[in-house]
Amino acid sequence: MNPPSTYLAEALAILDRDASRLEKIDRYFRGDHDMPYMPEGASSEYHLLAQRSRTNWCPLVVETPTQALYVDNFRRSEEKTTDAEVSPEWKHWQESRLDARQGVVYRTACEFGQSFILTERTRLGRVLSRVLSTLRTVTLYEDPAFDLDPAAAVYIKRFPSEVRAEANQRGLAYVWDETTRYTLEFDGGERNARVIDAELHGSSQCPVTRFTAYTDPEGRAWGVVEPLMDLQDRFNQTIFDLLMAQTYNSFNVRTVTGLAPPVEMEQKGDGSYGPKLDEENRPIPSRQYLNASRWFYAEDKDVEFGQLSGGPLDGFIASAELALRHISSTTQTPPHFLMGQIANVSADALEAAETSLSRKVDSFRSSFGESWERVFRIALSILGEPGADDYLGEVVWRDLGASSLAQSADALGKFAESLDVPKQGLWPRVPGVTRQELSEWADLKTKQDQDMQLLAELQMKMQQAAKVTQSPGASSGVASTAPKTRFGDVNDTAAAA
């Protein structure tokens, strides 16, 4: 185990190395893209069109898969709780308000390639999980490609450059290893660090968990924004060229030959009117505006009026559509999400169009699910609850696919009838069902079973009573030796006979 200052120095080196890359990714996600190419000395009008040409597709490409990611439950390897009870894992989930905050984890991981969750005991004694900034957090591994548990994690709460020089404050960082949380101060020069506080965090592992979208054998992580940046620049350049052509070359130009333009007139010093002259003593032509309410005529028969047609814009539009198709195929985003063409599309066609997206979402679920399971194990370890070493539990993802409710109901019915799958075991696969609804269904099913059992017992007793009244002894006037049964308003007819 290395000293915390060693971990801090390594983390600062990694943040310095990745700072420009992560800042550019963050900038592109927020729509602050590089300007399209324009010639040197371009006018302010060029710059205005360049600003308007930037169309940000990055949030849509990030939101599309993350909106299909929603953890709805956690299933332990050996379920020890009834449907009405709440497991310690799910109680930790609710106390940390992760129903709403899980979306931040997925969006950040898809944007930068990784995000981080810290699980720790608060000053009030509660064990909560919260999101750490990707731009300030580093996890260190012995084998970064395959290890899920980091050897240490570093979070920079304050850089030295973020404090005022006159305050004489240093940078502040937190370092977690397998047993202890350290608080360190450091400067921006030689970065010599000093431990100012140390306390046990209560977990058997480093309490920081990394969520990754894509990784390689070198342990490098990337998301969906970084491969999109070149395509985003290409699309912006196409839109800029389209706006230039639309502004300067898309309209028709009226022409006239053989006609002297009218000149501006002014009053001279002697009170007469004459042509207004420029600095070179030449008449200044007056500007003529042509609209739907005005028309031109000429007295000379040799005057000719004409028109120069505007340049076509179809090529630019086709180029923009091609760029969108490239974005769609590269990011596995359904084309109708980008094009907006969804009229008269059946559920089967939608499902076919979203097949690639579904595979992408399944890949994210596999990666993020392992990370959530580690978060639960860390929380149970700090709480001292059993299950901290349970590696067979799994999170349950909500089904947010494009299939209709009728299709899902038909498929689940066939599972129950043709494959003899227990019906209650198929309840979690109903689209949109929540854990609370499953618990209510289980209670209603238990009550229904009890009512059916009581009804069956009632029917059996009534049948037994009917047999007593119809026995041979009762019809011949001989007392029956069968046991007498009374239930409700059923009379002992045998005794009456």
Image: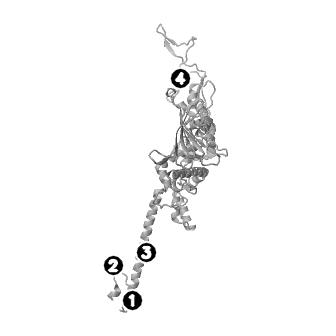
Mark 1 is surrounded, within 10 Å at the Cα level, by few (under 14), some (14 to 19) or many (20 or more) other residues, namely few
Q: Amino acid at mark 1?
A: Thr
Answer yes or no: do the residues labelled 2 and 1 have beta carbons within 8 Å?
Answer: no
Specify whether 495 is left or right of 331: left
Q: Amino acid at mark 4?
A: Gln
Q: CA distance from mark 2 to mark 1?
A: 22 Å
Answer yes or no: do the residues labelled 2 and 4 have beta carbons within 8 Å?
Answer: no
Which residue is denoted by mark 2 in the rendering? 489
> What SS does tag 3 mark?
helix
Q: Classify residue 138 by image quadrant.
A: top right
Q: Amino acid at mark 2?
A: Asp
Q: CA distance from mark 4 to mark 3?
A: 98 Å
> What SS does tag 2 mark?
loop
Of the two numbered discs 4 and 1 in the rendering, the one whose residue sits closer to the viewer: 1
The label on residue 288 is 4
User: Residue 384: where, in percent of width, then height?
Assistant: 50, 53
Answer yes or no: do the residues labelled 2 and 3 have beta carbons within 8 Å?
Answer: no
> Which residue is at the far right?
217
Q: Which quadrant would the N terminus be assigned to in this image?
A: top right
The label on residue 481 is 1
User: Residue 116: where, in percent of width, then height?
Assistant: 55, 44
Answer yes or no: do the residues labelled 4 and 3 have beta carbons within 8 Å?
Answer: no
291 lies above or below 152: above
How does the figure colour the protein chain or chains? Answer: one colour
- N-terminal label among 2 and 3: 3
Which residue is denoted by mark 3 in the rendering? 456
Mark 3 is surrounded, within 10 Å at the Cα level, by few (under 14), some (14 to 19) or many (20 or more) other residues, namely few
Q: Which quadrant would the C terminus be assigned to in this image?
A: bottom left
Question: Residue at (51%, 59%) from the top-left corner?
Answer: 428
User: Residue 156: where, in percent of width, then height?
Assistant: 55, 37
Of the two numbered discs 2 and 1 in the rendering, the one whose residue sits closer to the viewer: 1
